[in-house]
Image (tube, rainbow, N blue to C red):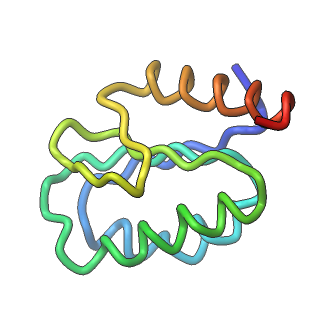
Amino acid sequence: MNSNIKIFNLKNKDEFLLNFKSIKRNTTFNIIITLNFNDFDKITERLFELSNLSRQNNKSFVIVNSIFHNENICVAPTVKEAHDIIEIEEIERDLLL
């Protein structure tokens, strides 16, 4: 498994908010966040912020959740698929695409 990936497995919105600063500090790594909840009010803007910071750092940011959908944030239904997305994006960056 790629050591350049930080994985956060969050059970609820409060846990996300408590860990937000820690996640933000890790945007120099590829990030996978598993959201094990379906209430995205009050966190969508923070997810955009994390996604944008990751992109600025030339890193990937993937949400794992089967309900959350957003055309500006990469979402995968499983952790395996999130890893695959990161691998593909790493190859694209290496090829300067």
Q: Residue at x 74, y 30 (%)?
A: 92
Q: Position of residue 78 (x, y in %)?
A: 35, 25
Image quadrant where one finds the N terminus: top right
Q: Residue at x 40, y 46 (%)?
A: 63
Count of numbered circles in the view: 0
Asked which quadrant contains residue 40, the reply is bottom left
Q: Position of residue 45 (x, y in %)?
A: 36, 77
Closer to the camera in the image, 60 or 18: 60
Closer to the camera in the image, 92 or 53: 92
- The answer to whether 34 is drawn above or below residue 83 in the figure is below
Please indicate whether residue 68 sits to the left or right of residue 29 in the image: left
Please indicate whether residue 88 sits to the left or right of residue 96 in the image: left
Closer to the camera in the image, 92 or 81: 92
- The answer to whether 36 is drawn above or below residue 17 in the figure is above
Image quadrant where one finds the C terminus: top right
Asked which quadrant contains residue 81, the reply is top left
Q: Residue at x 84, y 37 (%)?
A: 96
Q: Residue at x 18, y 52 (%)?
A: 37
Q: Residue furthest front?
A: 97
